[in-house]
Amino acid sequence: MANLLYRYINWNDRGSKRLLSENELFFYGADQWEKDGEYAFDLDGFSEMELFDIILKITDHLNNYHFDEYERWMNYNANKYGVDLSKLSIFQQDMMQQKFARKMAEEKVSNPAKFMELLKGVFFARTGIMSLSESKYSFNLWNSFRNEGSNNIICLGIDSDLLEGILANEGNCKKGKIKYSEETKKFELEFDPSGITNLNQLLTISFALKPRFQYEEEVRIQRLFIDNSRDSEERKIKLPDGIFKELIILKDADDATQSEVFALASQKNIENLQYVEILDDDSSVSMTII
């Protein structure tokens, strides 16, 4: 039997329901979780030249592959330092890119604490999160979704092994179980001249939450973005047919929702269908096979 992870879905949310209707895994912005986690960290000592190399590599990458982002960065620094880029030749603009990178390195090395805040800000701006659960029996999760004002709730069982293989081929993804603790662990980031490994290290930091969230039994998938716009294709991963193995629906869901969900389950050959009832008296749930 396949190992399953579960995604709870409010069927009234058009974006969330696309996981089943379109086989679309969607990453939401990490900034929604910033206040809930443990994000204290240090960075190994680094020199101004090492940081300059990092910034230059990142901006070269943007120039070659994401020119809109590069242009925004250049214009921001041109305004900051009073430079009219329109009066510069292409060669002079390239030299100005290096000057801006060096100025940024000077500023960050002179204020490491500020640099760390910047790095953390980049992480939250450029990271997407998909939250899954190890349990389909979580009274608190079923109840919290119901408390949003709807009985149209489903829980989708996803083949964990298939998902693992898909994420491995996508790149810039990390999947792990959340650790629940009151203690703030201080992470030490290793210096890396490529400019991207530091951000990948930050992915490990946000796999810790306060114990009040322990009932979620969360398994989290995170992905780093270059393009972090709401409609960015980097926010989406197309899942294959056959990855959904189980579907549970709240028995109180309305007829239209049940009809739509069961039609999709049939179309996607999901054979394990169950109803769930929320038992408020003893804070549990009861499931019956359909």
Image (cartoon, rainbow, N blue to C red):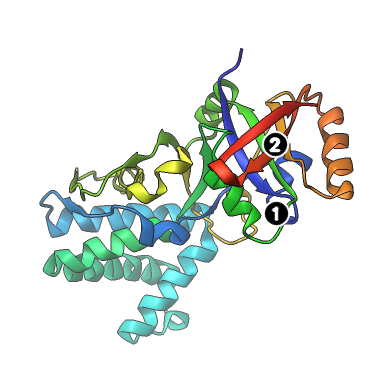
24 displayed left or right of 136: right
The label shown at residue 276 is 2
Q: How many marks?
A: 2
Which residue is at a point 35% across and 67% down the rendered structure image? 97
* Residue found at the very far bottom of the displayed protein: 82
Q: Is residue 141 above or below residue 242?
A: below
Q: Which residue is mark 1?
A: 15
Mark 1 packing: few (<14 Cα in 10 Å), some, or many (20+)? Answer: few
Q: Work out whether residue 261 or residue 250 is closer to the camera in this orientation and state it.
A: 250
Q: Quick one: 86 or 186, which is closer to the camera? A: 186
Q: Which numbered disc covers residue 175?
A: none
Residue 91 image position (x, y, % from top left): 39, 67
State whether residue 70 is above or below residue 283: below
Kind of residue at badge 2: Val
Locate residue 195 relative to residue 41 in the image: left or right.
right
Q: Can I make out residue 271 in this image?
A: yes
How far from the left and from the top, in percent, is residue 111? 14, 69
Label 1 – label 2 distance at C-alpha: 23 Å
Query: Are there few (<14), some (14-19), or many (20+) residues within 10 Å of tag 2?
Result: many
